[in-house]
Image: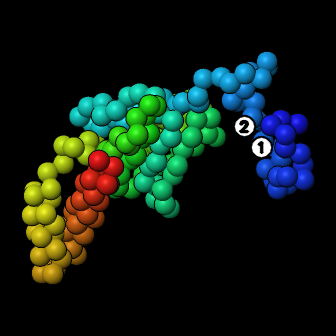
Amino acid sequence: RSAGLNRTDVPAMMISVMPFVLASRRNRAGKENMPLRVHVDVVSAEELIFSGETEFAVFPGEAGELGIYPRHAPLLTRVKPGTVRLKKPGVDDYELVYVSGGVLEVQPTLITLLADTAIRAHDLDEAKLLEAKCRAEEALSKRATDIDFATAESELAQTLAQLKTIKHARKSH
């Protein structure tokens, strides 16, 4: 028994998880250990965008957002265009990065995102993105060929994801 909890206080499926969670935060003497952290690398074809310790990270998975804490079970998945949110220790705001898609590998102490394109939120240019959005919407309305339509649709999705990243950045400041 840890932290005064007994089996009647916790739902049955949590009982097997609780000892691991509690043990990960306390040493044998019962004193608090250092906070749990996971190393995250966000890499694009051009450069290393982020490399550092985080307390928590959120990625735009194909089936929804993936929230990853330290000691997460191993995972390999694709990510879609969207915002990566990284909670750095001792900082209130999230580090925000736009990714156009890629592959996410999660290990208990390391997360690696290999992104097709990755741009820090503060490097995004809203005026250029709004122009690109208008061009993509215009191309969608013309629909000359199926290939043009697919390209315009993809460009619009990426532009909208970048604009969403800018909105996230404004909220966090």
Q: At x 21% / y 73%, what residue is drawn?
A: 149
Q: Label 1 is placed on what type of residue?
A: Val
Name which quarter of the figure residue 127 lies in.
bottom left
Q: Is residue 123 left or right of residue 35?
A: left
Give the residue furthest to the front: 4
Residue pointed to by mark 1: 17
Q: Crowdedness of circle 2 by 10 Å Cα count: few (<14), some, many (20+)?
A: few
Left or right: residue 150 compared with residue 35: left
Dot 1 alpha-carbon crowd within 10 angstroms: few under 14, some 14 to 19, many 20 or more = few
The location of residue 18, given as percent across then percent down, is: 78, 42
> Residue visible at 26% across and 63% down?
160
The percent position of residue 162, horizontal first and vertical second, equals: 25, 56
Residue lying at 83% horizontally and 35% vertically, measured from the top left: 2
* Marking on residue 21: 2
Q: Is residue 156 above or below residue 32?
A: below
Mark pair 1, 2: CA separation: 6 Å
Quadrant of the frame with the N terminus: top right
User: Label 2 amino acid?
Assistant: Val
